[in-house]
Amino acid sequence: MVNKPTSDMSLTANGLRDWLIQRFSAIILAIYFLVIVIFLLIHSPINFITLKNLFAHLWMQVFSIITLLCLIFHAWVGIWTVITDYIKPVFLRIFIQLLIILSLFIYFFWGIEVLWRLI
């Protein structure tokens, strides 16, 4: 008999939606990476003032926060998949997932703090 997979702590409790979130977030991350690389190539040599001016624009702040959220979601879906595939004891799996969720929240707020401090 095949056991139905559980969706404990899944992002959406739906495999297709998780897959779509990961693909969409990867596209956003790639676009952000390209924007940064193109900016660095155009404004060479780069210095702190140039970067500060880039991140002072509202569109770049919003884009950076959206990208940070996409990075968090992308990481969670990937990590959740690996954890549920390879860690079978439920207590250990949930404990590790909670640690990772806590870490992702810390990274998100740390990223916002870095972005606001740069402005």
Image (cartoon, rainbow, N blue to C red):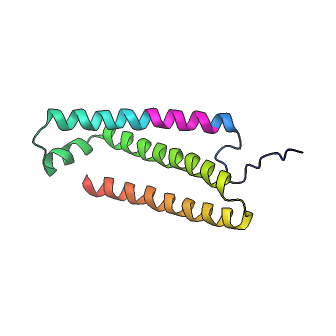
User: Is-magenta flag for residue 22?
Assistant: yes
Q: Pinpoint residue 97: horizontal percent, then vertical percent.
A: 61, 60
43 vs 69: above or below: above
Tell me the magenta residue range. Answer: 18-27
Q: Is residue 73 left or right of residue 66?
A: right
Q: In this view, does 15 lie to the left or right of 117?
A: right
From the image, give the main secondary structure of the stretch colored magenta: helix
Looking at this view, name the residue that lies furthest to the left.
Answer: 45
In depth, the one of 27 and 84 nearer the eye is: 84
Q: Pinpoint residue 23: horizontal percent, then vertical percent.
A: 52, 33
Q: Pinpoint residue 84: horizontal percent, then vertical percent.
A: 67, 53
58 vs 95: above or below: above
The quadrant in which residue 13 appears is top right
Residue at image location 27% in from the left, 40% down from the top: 57
Looking at this view, name the residue that lies furthest to the right.
Answer: 1
Q: State how many labels appear.
A: 0
Residue at image location 20% in from the left, 46% down from the top: 51
44 vs 93: above or below: above
Q: In this view, does 48 lie to the left or right of 8?
A: left
In depth, the one of 1 and 84 nearer the eye is: 1
Q: Pinpoint residue 68: horizontal percent, then vertical percent.
A: 42, 47
User: Is-magenta flag for residue 16?
Assistant: no
90 vs 51: above or below: below
Q: In this view, does 57 lie to the left or right of 99?
A: left
Residue at image location 46% in from the left, 62% down from the top: 106
Residue at image location 37% in from the left, 43% down from the top: 64
Give the position of the N terminus as an image quadrant. Answer: top right
